[in-house]
Image: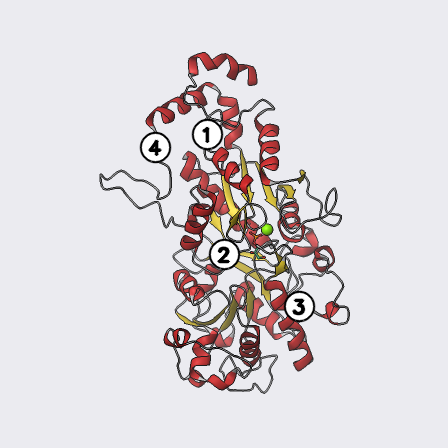
């Protein structure tokens, strides 16, 4: 059961009523996502719930829509606490749309030359093992049911990998969960990362290679994945962040129609970013310059980490102060005409190959919030997706149930879900609030003592992901559960041992 606090959904647990009328972003979001009545400059956009193809699910935002930078501006050395930040209210009526229907597989329709369906990257089916494991699962039905009634949600960076470098225990964990266990059973698991910056299929292919195990897009959620739901609402968007032009591809896959990236604008107006030092010939050649004085940008979507803070911050500031999102204009009332800005996640730090965690998208956002406040005198309002947002966990439920359908032909949500993460301020607090069991590992952001003081993991702290998974599996399937499959396993001779476990 989700355990978000009532105050975050309104006193009665319902979405809050009318937002502050003096706040334009609030009104905009309220109109678009709560009343279902689009704001004036988005009047052609579809209304939630009226889309015959399924529309979106609205999830109340749990993070304040108001800038978080104020407290930091006079005390930059103070480490912000997610608990304190979450203490702010959600009184704005802002909702985060997430895709309504289950995601379509982008891989499972692939078939072999002889017509048999397969999934790329999956090991070849071994008939002997298939038969033996299914016989074993039939004979040990209680353990088999328990294995299908538990699931893992894995954070990626700091748990399974550091950037492109494998955390060795991550490889072993996926072998076990993909069937290298005494029942040869697939124990359900999804990947829930605040990572970003490239299409899901490309990221899954990269992860499959690093982890030496198949990672399907059907079991994968990155920070901007639920933001595909926004394509129903915004016709023309500025997409910020990511390497090269991959986020343009991401937005295209999500169904956004008119996608602009900052380099398109730089290519059209090089003077817009006086601090930009390099604009390579290749970047220029792949840019799409236009007459931006004739284009209304309906929303700004920060999908991934900025590769050029100076340029991106400048262009975003220009747009936030423009008249209805037209570059080169200055709004008479910049606050009431401000276009909305979304961030795919809020992490301040991210573990990488570097020994000490590096700045992440949250620091870019806080820089923007501080600049906006200093320049305009008012707080920036914005929406943040990703962990620990409720929307991301709700979407995870959808994906988890759908993945159960794929691997066990049984589309439902397992009851015992374990979140394994390294960041107390996103993985753990989000999992705790959502009623999942949480495991904190010591291979990433968390480098503290027994447990995190402000956001303690409910199931425990472990040296690495393998220890966490083995402990959880033993709790659900029995202390004697074996983490190896043997082709020599014979259901008849093994039956005694199996009944002993049950
Ligand atoms: O914070 C940036 C991102 O790379 C973190 O990813 O997998 O730890 O949620 P993850
Ligand atoms: Mg992490």
User: Which disc is residue 245 wearing?
Assistant: none
Which residue is pictured at 47% across the width and 60% down the height? Answer: 229
Disc 3 within 8 angstroms of ligand 1 (CB): no
In the rendered image, residue 176, in percent from the top left (x then y), is placed at 50, 33
Give the mark, 3 or 4, whose residue is nearer the N terminus. Answer: 3
The correct choice, above or below, for 129 with respect to 422 in the image is above
In terms of depth relative to the viewer, which is nearer, 237 or 233?
237
Q: Quarter holding the N terminus?
A: top right
Task: Quote the CA–CA distance across marks 1 and 4.
Answer: 13 Å
In the rendered image, residue 272, in percent from the top left (x then y), is placed at 51, 84
Task: Quote the CA–CA distance across marks 1 and 2.
Answer: 29 Å
Tag 3 near tag 2, CB within 8 Å: no
The residue indicated by pointer 1 is: 185
Give the mark, 2 or 4, whose residue is nearer the N terminus. Answer: 4
| Res. 16 image quadrant | bottom right
Disc 1 within 8 angstroms of ligand 1 (CB): no
Mark in the foreground, 2 or 4 = 4
The correct choice, above or below, for 460 with respect to 302 in the image is above
Give the mark, 1 or 3, whose residue is nearer the N terminus. Answer: 3
User: Which disc is residue 226 wearing?
Assistant: 2
The residue indicated by pointer 3 is: 66
Which residue is pictured at 38% across the width and 25% down the height? Answer: 129
Tag 1 near tag 3, CB within 8 Å: no
Task: Quote the CA–CA distance across marks 2 and 4.
Answer: 33 Å
User: Which disc is residue 125 wearing?
Assistant: 4
Mark in the foreground, 1 or 2 = 1
Disc 4 within 8 angstroms of ligand 1 (CB): no
């Amino acid at each position: 059961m989700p355990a978000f606090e009532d105050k975050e959904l309104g006193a009665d647990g319902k979405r809050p009523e009318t937002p502050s009328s003096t706040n334009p972003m609030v009104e905009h979001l309220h109109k678009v996502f709560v009343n279902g009545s689009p704001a004036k400059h988005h009047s052609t956009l579809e209304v939630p719930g009226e889309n015959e193809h399924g529309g979106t699910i609205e999830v109340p935002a749990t993070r304040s829509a108001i800038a978080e930078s104020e407290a930091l501006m006079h005390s930059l050395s103070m480490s912000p606490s997610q608990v304190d930040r979450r203490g702010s209210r959600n009184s704005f009526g802002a909702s985060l749309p997430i895709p309504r229907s289950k995601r379509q597989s982008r891989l499972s329709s692939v078939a072999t030359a002889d017509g048999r369906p397969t999934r790329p990257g999956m090991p070849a089916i071994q008939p002997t093992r298939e038969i033996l494991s299914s016989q074993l699962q039939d004979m040990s039905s209680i353990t088999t049911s328990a294995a299908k009634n538990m699931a893992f949600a894995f954070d990626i960076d700091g748990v399974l990998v550091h950037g492109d470098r494998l955390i060795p225990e991550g490889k072993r964990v996926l072998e076990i969960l993909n069937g290298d266990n005494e029942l040869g059973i697939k124990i359900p698991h999804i990947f829930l990362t605040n990572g970003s910056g490239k299409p899901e299929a490309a990221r899954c292919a990269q992860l499959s290679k690093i982890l030496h195990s198949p990672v399907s897009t059907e079991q994968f959620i990155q920070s901007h994945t639920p933001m595909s739901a926004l394509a129903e609402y915004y016709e023309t968007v500025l997409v910020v962040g990511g390497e090269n032009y991959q986020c343009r591809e991401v937005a295209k896959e999500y169904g956004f129609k008119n996608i602009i990236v900052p380099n398109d604008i730089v290519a059209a107006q090089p003077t817009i970013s006086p601090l930009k030092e390099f604009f390579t010939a290749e970047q220029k050649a792949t840019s799409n310059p236009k007459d931006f004085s004739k284009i209304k940008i309906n929303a700004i979507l920060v999908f991934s980490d900025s590769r050029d803070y100076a340029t991106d911050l400048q262009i975003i500031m220009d747009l936030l102060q423009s008249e209805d999102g037209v570059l080169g204009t200055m709004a008479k009332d910049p606050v009431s005409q401000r276009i909305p800005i979304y961030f795919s996640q809020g992490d301040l730090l991210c573990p990488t190959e570097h020994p000490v965690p590096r700045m992440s998208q949250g620091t870019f956002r806080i820089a923007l919030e501080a600049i906006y406040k200093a320049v305009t005198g008012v707080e920036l309002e914005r929406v943040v997706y990703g962990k620990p947002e409720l929307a991301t966990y709700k979407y995870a439920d959808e994906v988890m149930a759908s993945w159960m359908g794929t691997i066990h032909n049984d589309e439902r949500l397992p009851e015992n879900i374990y979140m394994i993460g390294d960041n107390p301020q996103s993985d753990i607090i989000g999992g705790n609030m959502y009623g999942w069991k949480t495991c904190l590992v010591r291979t990433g952001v968390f480098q503290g003592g027994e447990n995190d003081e402000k956001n303690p993991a409910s199931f425990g702290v472990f040296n690495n992901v393998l220890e966490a998974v083995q402990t959880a599996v033993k709790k659900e399937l029995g202390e004697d559960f074996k983490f190896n499959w043997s082709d020599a396993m014979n259901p008849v001779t093994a039956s005694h041992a199996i009944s002993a476990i049950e």
